């Protein structure tokens, strides 16, 4: 007679994840510590693997392990450009957490909230080391989920932020964004009519559009100010190669991931990588050294950041009695 191991896992819906109320400041700290743990060699984070069922679509598998917080799991995340026209979100996915000692699945949770928050937090961490401390103006190109989460965390990180210039190809999305984020953050948010207006004169620029297979980038080198910091979340979809090459320092959240992404068609004309963010956070290489430096951090998205946040959400959900237990 074979005795079956009785095991159950916790299922957390999008609303369950949100109900844990993990604070923005804590998420930023978790992401920074994940980068530090990466520098210390205490993580496993292979380059993400992907399939592409449609043009301008992807489904990525993103496994990761963090030793210190004993987090192990995988994110299965998709982005489909045509989804919003169907009334569906651009990105959807799941995170599966495994027990660090036995490998048994312990939690399945919606990945959309975690993805939004950890991506914004990674921008904030990069900006902490690479942007001017007195940054006052922010340009946001792409007023969707990431446009919101990035503004939220940068407003926390930069207390002197005075003006936000927002641009979106969809005028209704732009109007809704300006109204919603003005009410939420009490900042001066000004809609602009072109990418150039959103970039020129800004201390920090975040591009948060979809990742495109057939790219026609528009952002020119001369639009970007000396002393500025840029963080594209959309790969090389919107920054022209000469704009990227105009940077004094071209950084990334993960060197191996950028090299892998280059092998599948992106970044064919990108500059040499100055540093991985973990190298800067760990002290191997300096971040911003001069007020006039033009710096870019090409953040591609790291699963260690997902797992660092997801394990905290799992622990908080158990403590608060949130979610549904399912038999395995």
Image (cartoon, rainbow, N blue to C red):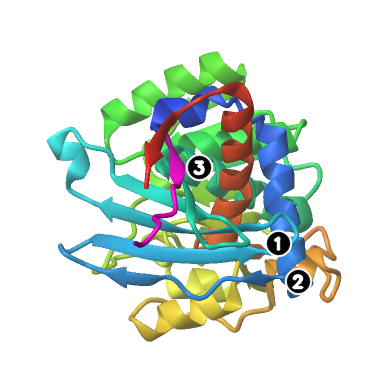
Tell me if mark 1 has few (under 14), some (14-19) or many (20+) residues whose alpha carbon lies within 10 angstroms of its own: many
Lower position in the chain sequence, tag 3 or tag 2 = 2
Give the spatial CA distance, label 3 vs label 1.
Answer: 17 Å
State the count of labels.
3
Please tell me which residue is depicted at 70% across the width and 58% down the height of the picture.
Answer: 34
x, y percentage for residue 285? 82, 75
Identify whether 127 is placed above or below 301: above
The answer to if 321 sits in the magenta stretch is no
Secondary structure of the residue carrying tag 3 is helix
Secondary structure, magenta segment, majority class: loop
Say whether residue 3 is magenta: yes
Give whichever of discs 3 and 1 has the lower sequence position: 1
| Residue with the most extreme front position | 1
The answer to whether residue 253 is above or below residue 46 is above
Q: Is residue 263 visible?
A: yes
Q: Looking at the picture, how far across and down is residue 291, in whole percent?
A: 81, 58
Q: Position of residue 75 (x, y in %)?
A: 43, 56
- Secondary structure, mark 2, is helix
Task: Tell me the residue at 27%/35% (across/down).
Answer: 170
Against 39, residue 119 (above or below) is above
Query: Compared with residue 166, is residue 300 higher up or lower down, i.e. above or below?
Result: below
> Would you name the residue on which mark 3 appears?
114
Residue 27: mark:
none
Q: Nearer the viewer, residue 22 or 147?
A: 22
- Please state if 257 lies on the left or on the right of 215 as rendered: right
Q: Are marks 2 and 1 in contact (CB under 8 Å)?
A: yes
The range drawn in magenta is 1-11
Q: Nearer the viewer, residue 52 or 309?
A: 309
Q: Which residue is mark 2?
A: 39
Residue 35 image label: 1
Residue 62 position, x and y percent, is 45, 64
Q: Which one is nearer the viewer's eye here, 275 or 7?
A: 7
């Amino acid at each position: 007679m074979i005795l079956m191991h009785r095991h159950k896992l916790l299922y957390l819906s999008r609303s369950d994840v949100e109900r844990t109320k993990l604070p923005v400041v804590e998420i930023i700290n978790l992401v920074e510590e994940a980068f530090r743990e990466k520098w210390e060699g205490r993580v496993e984070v292979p380059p993400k693997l992907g399939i592409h069922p449609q043009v301008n679509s992807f489904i990525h598998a993103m496994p990761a392990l963090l030793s210190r917080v004993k987090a192990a799991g995988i994110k299965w995340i998709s982005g489909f450009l045509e989804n919003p026209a169907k009334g569906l979100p651009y990105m959807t996915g799941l995170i599966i957490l495994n027990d660090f000692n036995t490998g048994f699945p312990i939690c399945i949770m919606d990945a959309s909230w975690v993805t939004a928050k950890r991506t914004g937090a990674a921008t904030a961490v990069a900006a902490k080391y690479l942007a001017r401390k007195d940054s006052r103006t922010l340009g946001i190109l792409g007023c969707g989920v990431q446009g919101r989460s990035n503004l939220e965390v940068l407003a926390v990180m930069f207390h002197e932020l005075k003006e936000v210039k927002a641009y979106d190809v969809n005028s209704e999305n732009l109007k809704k964004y300006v109204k919603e984020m003005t009410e939420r953050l009490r900042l001066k948010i000004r809609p602009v009519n072109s990418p150039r207006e959103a970039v020129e004169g800004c201390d920090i620029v975040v591009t948060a559009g979809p990742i495109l297979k057939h790219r026609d980038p528009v952002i020119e080198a001369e639009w970007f100010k000396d002393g500025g910091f840029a963080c594209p979340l959309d790969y090389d979809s919107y920054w022209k190669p000469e704009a990227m090459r105009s940077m004094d320092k071209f950084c990334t959240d993960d060197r191996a991931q950028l090299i892998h992404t280059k092998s599948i068609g992106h970044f064919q004309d990108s500059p040499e990588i100055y540093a991985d963010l973990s190298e800067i956070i760990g002290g191997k290489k300096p971040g911003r050294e001069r007020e006039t430096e033009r710096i870019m951090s090409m953040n591609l998205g790291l699963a260690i950041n997902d797992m660092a946040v997801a394990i905290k959400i799992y622990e908080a959900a158990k403590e608060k009695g949130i979610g549904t237990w399912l038999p395995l």
